[in-house]
């Protein structure tokens, strides 16, 4: 799968593509229809990176004073961007099996480990 024009047009996104692509697609070649989901994953990773950079530079809270000397505290807008982006990325981490739990869960759900073994027992996937 080739980099999309949106990825090629930005060095940060291109670097993120180069970092994540071999990690996610190490055991199979993605189809062209996978590019939209992977592209969106990369864009969200870029947003997360920019938000973290802003927080590292400016901190989570801004302190200032009003005309009367009263201390004002405001949160860095990058913190909300980071929180929202984190929630959006969870679905992509699951889709691309980026955690050990997801890899085991997907293998059991889709019978990847033992082809043709459809015993219908998914009790180990239930959470109590």
Image (tube, rainbow, N blue to C red):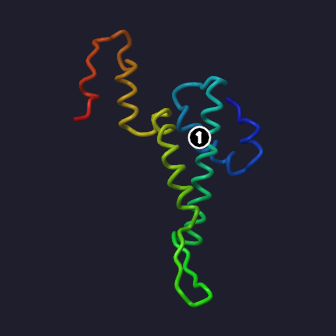
Residue found at the far bottom of this picture: 68
* Residue 105 vertical position relative to residue 67 in the rendered view, above or below: above
- Residue placed at 75% from the left, 42% from the top? 8
Which of these two is toward me, 32 or 28? 32
* Furthest residue toward front: 68
Q: Could you say whether the residue bearing mark 1 is in a helix, strand or loop?
A: helix
User: Where's residue 104, x and y in %?
Assistant: 35, 30
Q: Residue at x 74, y 41 (%)?
A: 6
Left of 96 or right of it: where is 109? left
* Whether residue 51 is situated above or below residue 93 in the rendered picture: below
Q: Which quadrant of the rendered structure holds the C terminus?
A: top left
Q: Which residue is mark 1?
A: 41
Q: Relative to residue 44, is residue 34 depicted above or below?
A: above
Residue located 60% across and 84% down the image:
66
> What is the x, y in percent for residue 29?
59, 25
Compared to residue 41, the image places residue 106 above or below, namely above
Q: Residue furthest left?
A: 128
Residue 116: image quadrant is: top left
Image coordinates of residue 52 in percent, x first then y, are 56, 61
Q: How many marks?
A: 1
Mark 1 closeness class: few <14, some 14–19, many ≥20 residues within 10 Å: many
Q: Nearer the viewer, residue 68 or 100?
A: 68
Is 66 left or right of 11, judged from the image as shown?
left
Indicate the position of residue 88 as horizontal and vertical percent values. Answer: 52, 43
Q: Hey, which quadrant is residue 97 in on the image?
A: top left
Q: Quadrant of the N terminus?
A: top right
Residue displayed at 58% across by 48% down: 45
């Amino acid at each position: 799968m080739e980099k999309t024009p949106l990825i090629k047009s930005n060095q940060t996104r291109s670097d993120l593509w180069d970092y994540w692509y071999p990690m996610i697609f190490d055991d199979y070649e993605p189809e062209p229809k996978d590019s939209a989901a992977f592209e969106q994953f990369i864009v969200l990773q870029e947003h997360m990176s920019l938000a973290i950079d802003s927080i590292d530079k400016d901190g989570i809270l801004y302190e200032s004073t009003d005309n009367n000397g009263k201390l004002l505290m405001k949160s860095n807008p990058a913190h909300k961007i980071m929180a929202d982006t984190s929630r959006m990325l969870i679905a992509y981490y699951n889709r691309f099996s980026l955690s050990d739990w997801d890899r085991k869960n997907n293998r059991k759900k889709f019978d990847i480990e033992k082809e043709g073994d459809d015993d219908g027992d998914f009790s180990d996937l239930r959470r109590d």
